[in-house]
Amino acid sequence: MAYDYDLFVIGAGSGGVRAARRAAEAGARVAIAESDRVGGTCVIRGCIPKKLLVYASHFHEEFEDSAAYGWTIGPAAFDWPTLIANKDKEIARLEGLYRANLEKAGVELLETRASLEGPHRVKLDGPRRTVTAERILVATGGRPNPHRALRGHEHCITSNEAFHLPSLPKRVLIEGGGYIAIEFAGIFHGLGVETTIVYRGREVLSRFDMDLRRLLHAEATNKGIRILCQQIITQVEKRPDGGLSAQLSGGGVEEADQILLAVGRQPNVEGLGLETVGIELTKTHAIPVDEYSQTSVDHIWAIGDVTDRIQLTPVAIHEAMCFVDTVFHGRPTKPDYGSVATAVFSQPEIGTVGLTEDAARSRHANLDIYKTAFRPLKGTLTGRSDRMLMKLVVDADSDCVLGAHVLGPGAGEMAQLLAIPIKMHATKADFDATMAVHPTASEELVTFSAPTERIRGGETVAA
């Protein structure tokens, strides 16, 4: 059978675009369909605009700290519309690059909604027609959970709307304790907004190392962010003055100008026509795939957040590369999810790679824990009480470094570099043999002299 395309990609986010480009560069006839803007969550309403807002929120502390270093700065004023306009300009520029790269690779961009109509058949909504493809890749990503079970959810916003608020609220209430909640809390607080987090768990940032979680909570609270754990919002009402009232499970009421719901994300699978080819979803409504990102249908693959594996942009890109290697280069390649580094652009920032202490305890009987918390050098003149945390989790039997966890300025950059030795199964002796760079915070990672905690047979013994 002659197909219109060798590969049809549904969704032009980071994963879909990378797969389309690389497949086209390998000689395939490729089309990609996108009903929204090109670039997906990361570029349009996620990682990139988020970090631009994080940068903006840092300046108030920088202005304060400059006085201790001899600077005299006049009254500072912040203008939200200017920030949003400049952010939008940069996002438009990046979207243009994504489009240009697709065109350069020879990929046909179809700006319309696409869905599966049957085996090898893709229906396009505008103009309405059907095309055929030998292979189909679903890369539609995810979206914020609107929390429709919450009474009054329609009065709230998600991260999507937070990037386009017409004005900066005076008070914001954020429900959630993950990346998005923590990062937006830092953004809003840094821009002068009275900020409160409500989280159902015992501590924010579940699945991260507990020492990181506890210190982040303490430091955020020290900066002025209120964090209310083991509570949820049970109802939201809009007041006559336009403000919002949130009833909490603990019995309290919180008043806010905006309520941001950051209670998870869900895969974009609605209207894809998966049922027409017999693909059944998982319990989390994601598309199930095998180790090579192939679905239960032999000519359909899926990558990225729509598969609900690890929801990170670099992971989706990695899955795209593995897909192209497997299908178009004849090199079967499984995505490697071991020791995936990640950063939380909280305030203070987190960078982490490898096993947490709790995860390591569940897998290894004997561990050595190296940990230190200290005030960064910059704070010695300013009097700011912010603390940094450096932590290594080491298998005491093999001396292999299982995990590295950093909280403080530059933690994300450190995590990327730490991922290399940990991926290579470096030992604590390898870290010790590495000459320190002085004066830096990261030198602490190669100058630990002795464990702060020893775990033997699963039990803590004297350090």
Image: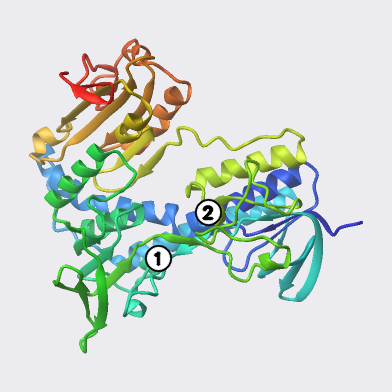
Secondary structure beneath label 1: helix
* Observer-nearest of 24 and 268: 268
Instruction: Tell me the distance, in whole angstroms, between the alpha carbons under discs 2 and 1.
Output: 28 Å
How far across and down, in percent of the image, does residue 258 sit? 27, 72
The tag earlier along the polypeptide, 2 or 1, is: 1
Q: Residue furthest right?
A: 1
- What residue did someone put label 2 on? 305
Mark 2 vs mark 1, foreground winner is 2
Residue 8 is at least partly visible in this image = yes
Above or below 57: residue 276 = below
Q: Residue at x 48, y 50 (%)?
A: 311
Q: Residue furthest bottom?
A: 240
Badge 2 density bin: few <14, some 14–19, many ≥20, Cα 10 Å:
many
Q: Residue at x 51, y 59 (%)?
A: 283
Q: In the picture, which quadrant includes the N terminus?
A: bottom right
How far across and down, in percent of the image, does residue 56 sit? 30, 54
Quadrant of residue 182 within the rendered picture: bottom left
- Please tell me the numbered disc located at residue 85: 1
Under mark 2, the amino acid is Asp
Q: Give the colour scheme of this rendering.
A: rainbow
Secondary structure beneath label 2: helix
Q: Residue at x 71, y 34 (%)?
A: 332
